Amino acid sequence: MAEYDYDLFVIGGGSGGVRAARISATHGAKVAIAEEFRMGGTCVIRGCVPKKMLVYGSHFAEDLHEAHRFGWDVEGAAFDWPRLRDIVQADVDRLEGLYSVNLGNVGVEIIEQRAVVAGPNAVKLADGKTVSAKYILIATGGWPAPAGCPGEEHALTSNEIFHLEKKPENIIIVGGGYIANEFAGIFHAFGSNVIVANRSEKILRPYDQEIVGRLQEISEAKGIAYRLNAPLEKIEKNDDGTVTVHFRDGGPPQNADVIMVATGRVPNSANLGLEEAGVALDQAGAVSVGDDNRSSVESIYAVGDVTNRVQLTPVAIREGHAFADSVFGGNPRTISYDNIPSAVFSSPPIASVGMTEDEARAKFGEDIKIYRSDFKPMKNVVSGREERALYKMITRGPDETVIGLHMIGPESAEILQGAAVAIVGKMPKKVLDDVVAIHPSMAEELVLFK
Ligand code: NDP
């Protein structure tokens, strides 16, 4: 008889957990995965995927508005939030099903209930059953941080925003990060009045601030309002269902139909039996792991947002895959956290890889060179839209190694993905100069920097 019920028990069916379970099973391990909510996790169920679908929906606002400049008459165009919401949710259901099918195809047992750690090799299920596993993988992700002020229960988060009954006329979005800026663009395009309120004066702090400045300029010109240096004081619910939000900035309170809080995500590690089993957590509640994803308990590993390293889906997927290859595939390996490309699907989107200008200056002083291309995309010329794109390249040293690429403009995430190769490959700018431009395109600006 086998010593354990399973070789691997994964707690959490999100991006990292599903990848780890699937690859471990293909390496021959007997695997179970427990998910208490819906298979797919934050990214598929209430994050990247449905958000991107809403972003696509939002693009029609400007395209329809400008259609007449391209010769099209579009009369009577109207936006129907419930229709988009339901179509998006139907696709989320489809994807959730696919995740389960793919796991089943490689023999992973899916357990649709909450599971908690009951010892270094034991997992207790919500139905009271305890099972044993040689290894346990914690992949429980993160959870939106609460507003942290009186009345916080009246605020929605990214968990609930996809299910709104109706489109808000007025929405206050608290935070200045990814989620706040993405949903500001989405709801503004749908016709809501949007106020982005952030506690400090900087939004999107990790991004190149010149690029961020361009987003703010464009957003303000469209009508998105920013209330900066405005920490939340309290949220009041009114009899008519609206909210009144008070800020600690000396300004007047603000009324809205909806307040959404997006002030970061905290690791989902509470009440999982981790401390009791001896798993060390850091101050933020994240599972502390080494490069090999192993926790302070030899048989317990963790990947993804619950470790609070880089809160991005593709990173969690890589961690999960590296875990499976290392533990079950006979190929011990770690992943690199250097030069991770990322994008904010704001309107227009921002994409970035490598060092920002501030970071490069702080580290290399005068040894860097900044190239800029500030241009009006051709589509905006025809449509009469004033928005300009801004691309920045940062190089270092006499051979001008590319160490940073930062962009704001249409399709910037699509364009940057390929260009990120230049940074990861430590290429000199000359290699990009040698690439013949694809004309006319926006991407050609990347090989025409002067
Ligand atoms: P972010 O970490 O992006 O931004 C948090 C924002 O909230 C910052 O502006 C920060 O301000 C502010 N903030 C932080 N703590 C507090 C607080 N206690 N009170 C008030 N304001 C606070 O968080 P998000 O919630 O937008 O997103 C969570 C994570 O999800 C992101 O870090 C990202 O990794 C991931 N994500 C990625 C996306 C993508 O790849 N496109 C899309 C959506 C989410 P300050 O800078 O002043 O501290």
Image (cartoon, rainbow, N blue to C red):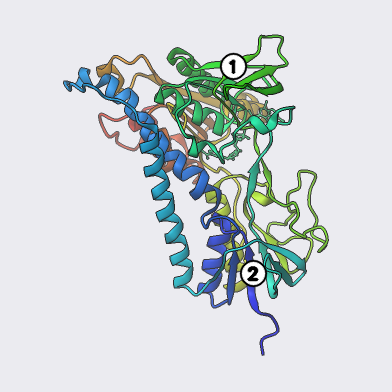
Residue at the far top: name it. 251
Q: Rate crowding at label 2 as few (under 14), some (14 to 19) or many (20 or more) other CA atoms within 10 Å.
A: many
Question: Would you place residue 362 above or below residue 2 in this image?
Answer: above
Residue at the far bottom: name it. 1
Q: Return the x and y of residue 19 as percentages of the image width and height.
A: 53, 61
**Mark number, residue 6:** none
Residue identified by numbered label 2: 9
Identity of the residue drawn at 67% across and 33% down: 153
Q: Please, what is the three-letter code of the amino acid marked with disc 1?
A: Asn
Which of the two marks, 2 or 1, is nearer to us in this view?
1
In this rendering, position of residue 360 left or right of residue 402? right
Identity of the residue drawn at 69% across and 35% down: 146
Q: Is mark 1 within 8 Å of ligand 1?
A: no
Q: Return the x and y of residue 96 as percentages of the image width and height.
A: 46, 56
Report if residue 36 is visible in the image: yes
> Where's the N terminus, which quadrant?
bottom right
Q: Which secondary structure, mark 1?
A: strand
Q: How many marks?
A: 2
Q: Nearer the viewer, residue 369 or 195?
A: 195
In this rendering, position of residue 59 left or right of residue 174? left
Q: Please, what is the three-letter code of the amino acid marked with disc 2?
A: Phe
Identity of the residue drawn at 46% across and 14% down: 223
Would you identify the image quadrant in which residue 58 lies? top left
Q: Return the x and y of residue 262 as percentages of the image width and height.
A: 61, 32
Identity of the residue drawn at 47% across and 64% down: 100
Q: Return the x and y of residue 420 as percentages of the image width and height.
A: 46, 41
Q: Rate crowding at label 1 as few (under 14), some (14 to 19) or many (20 or more) other CA atoms within 10 Å.
A: some
Q: Nearer the viewer, residue 28 or 125?
A: 125
Residue identified by numbered label 1: 255
Would you identify the image quadrant in which residue 205 lies? top right
Q: Nearer the viewer, residue 311 or 318?
A: 311
Question: Would you place residue 72 above or below residue 405 in this image?
Answer: above
